Image (cartoon, rainbow, N blue to C red):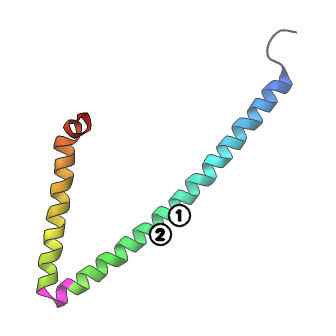
């Protein structure tokens, strides 16, 4: 008979199925963690909003933080390739 050995093919497919199951489990764990972290970010955003409404100083600190974060992201985007080359 010509072709692949059916037992070897079955063994290979068993390995592929195990890999798919492992990846599916990891994907579910990552989705759960992502949802948890998004909930935490939402909670902290609400706390920051509450604090900034009660204090004008906090509002300016949040704005400064946001500006610094955006500036950092912009620098990484513009100069990222140059920084990696050095």
Seen from the viewer's position, the closer of residues 6 and 19 is: 19
For the point 29% across and 76% down, the residue is 45
Measuring from the top left, give residue 81's x and y in whole percent. Answer: 23, 36
Q: Which residue is mark 2?
A: 36
Q: Quadrant of the C terminus?
A: top left
Q: Which residues are magenta?
A: 52-56
Q: Quadrant of residue 71?
A: bottom left
Answer left or right for 9 relative to 49: right
Above or below residue 6? Residue 19 is below
24, above or below 16, in the image: below
Name the residue furthest right: 1
The residue depicted at 47 percent of the width and 66 percent of the height is 35
Q: Main secondary structure of the magenta part?
A: helix
Residue drawn where x is 15% and y is 76% of the image: 61
Assess whether residue 55 is covered by the magenta stretch: yes
Residue 22 in magenta stretch: no
**Disc 1 and disc 2 in contact, CB within 8 angstroms:** yes
Outermost residue toward the bottom? 54
**Residue topped by disc 1:** 32
């Amino acid at each position: 008979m010509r072709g692949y050995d059916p037992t070897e093919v079955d063994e290979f497919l068993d390995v592929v199925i195990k890999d798919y199951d492992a990846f599916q489990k990891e994907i579910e764990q990552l989705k759960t963690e992502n949802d948890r972290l998004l909930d935490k970010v939402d909670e902290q955003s609400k706390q920051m909003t509450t604090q900034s409404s009660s204090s004008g100083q906090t509002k300016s600190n949040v704005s400064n933080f946001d500006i610094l974060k955006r500036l950092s992201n912009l620098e990484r985007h513009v100069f990222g390739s140059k920084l990696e080359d050095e």
